[in-house]
Image (cartoon, rainbow, N blue to C red):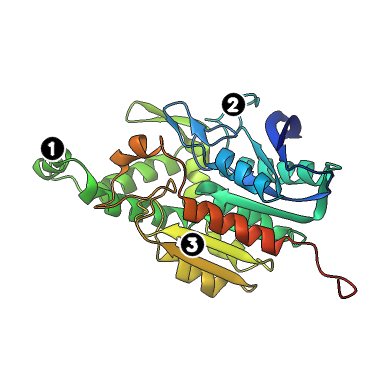
Amino acid sequence: MRDIDLTFASGGERLAGTLTLPDGDGPFSAALLVPGSGPIDRDSDHRRLPLGVTRQLAEAFAAAGIASLRYDKRGVGASTGSFLAAGLRDNMDDAGAALAALRERPEIDPARVAPAGHSEGALIAANLAAHDHTVAAVVLLAGAAKIGSELLRWQAARLAPTMPAVVRALLRLTRTDLVTKVTKNHERIRRTTTDVARIGGVRVNARWTREFLDYDPTADLALIQAPVLAVTGDKDLQVDPGDLARMAELVPGPIETRLIPDLDHILRRQPGPPSLRAYKREAREPIDAQVRDLVTGWLARTLAVPVRDGR
């Protein structure tokens, strides 16, 4: 396995990433690893929660003969720009620029490249595949098939029962419905016009939120012709596992969906009742081996060199 640092331009910014190559001369099939939400770097690490999702997938892919590119989001790691000022559409443009940079590398076979995204990255990977029919495949890890505003309301309803007892008691005492509170905050953000705004005294990425609330991934899913692998855990609190069935209905091309028992949003196993509070402990462990091997094996088969002349 070889790592090469590279940079590419997008929206007036310089984004930095790592090209991971398997042993050998190539040209290799390759995956563009699209990161999830939040200010995370090329390895899917947040300064308070190092998840390592894209780094671990890159290592698994290389061992199977698949190259990959992963990158720091705007304003994170070695990339320029401001994370808080970037919108969802900026993130999509950045992924498109990364895909182009990957295809231009001499070590890569441009006809055998697949975007593979986690969480927000799954939405972006689907968007890439919808509008670029030359992608060879697409992997959607913990992806969604709901308009953003509906997804966030679903999250709030799912999270409320998992909160600590003292928080649930406080919500009851103050007669606060979490879904209603979240919806009101979204309405406040919709009324903003700046990239960054203060909600409840906290600076938030207002432009990203406005764009996400109105983004409906079903339109992109309905345009994907490439083979799709969609994987979600049944303990996911941030996307609806039921969206896998909706994806299967929408995608016109070949699609394989997998619902993994006890898997949560950060691709770790979580026995017992689902809870976000387990993330910090789980992040010390590697991503689930079944998910890693499932994605790696599926990509290796799907991106394999076509058989020619009976050989």
Which residue in the protein does label 2 denote? 75
Q: Which residue is mark 1?
A: 166
183 horizontally vs 121: left or right:
left
Helix, strand or loop for disc 3: loop
Q: Is any atom of residue 8 visible in this view?
A: yes
Q: Nearer the viewer, residue 244 or 3?
A: 3
Residue at x 69%, y 31% (from the top left corner) = 15
x, y percentage for residue 254?
Answer: 63, 72
Out of 37 and 83, give the one closest to the viewer: 37
At mark 1, the secondary structure is helix
Residues under numbered marks 2 and 3 in contact, where contact means CB atoms less than 8 Å apart = no
**Which residue is more in the foreground, 212 or 141?**
141
Residue beneath disc 3? 145
Mark 2: give few (<14), some (14-19) or many (20+) Cα within 10 Å: many
Q: With 61 as the anchor, is 26 left or right in this view?
A: right
How far is mark 2 from mark 3, CA to CA?
Answer: 28 Å
**Does 89 appear above or below 307?**
above
Q: CA distance from mark 2 to mark 1?
A: 36 Å
Q: Amino acid at mark 2?
A: Gly
Q: Is residue 110 above or below residue 45?
A: below
**Quarter of the N terminus within the rendering:** top right
Mark with earlier residue (2, 3): 2
Amino acid of disc 1:
Val
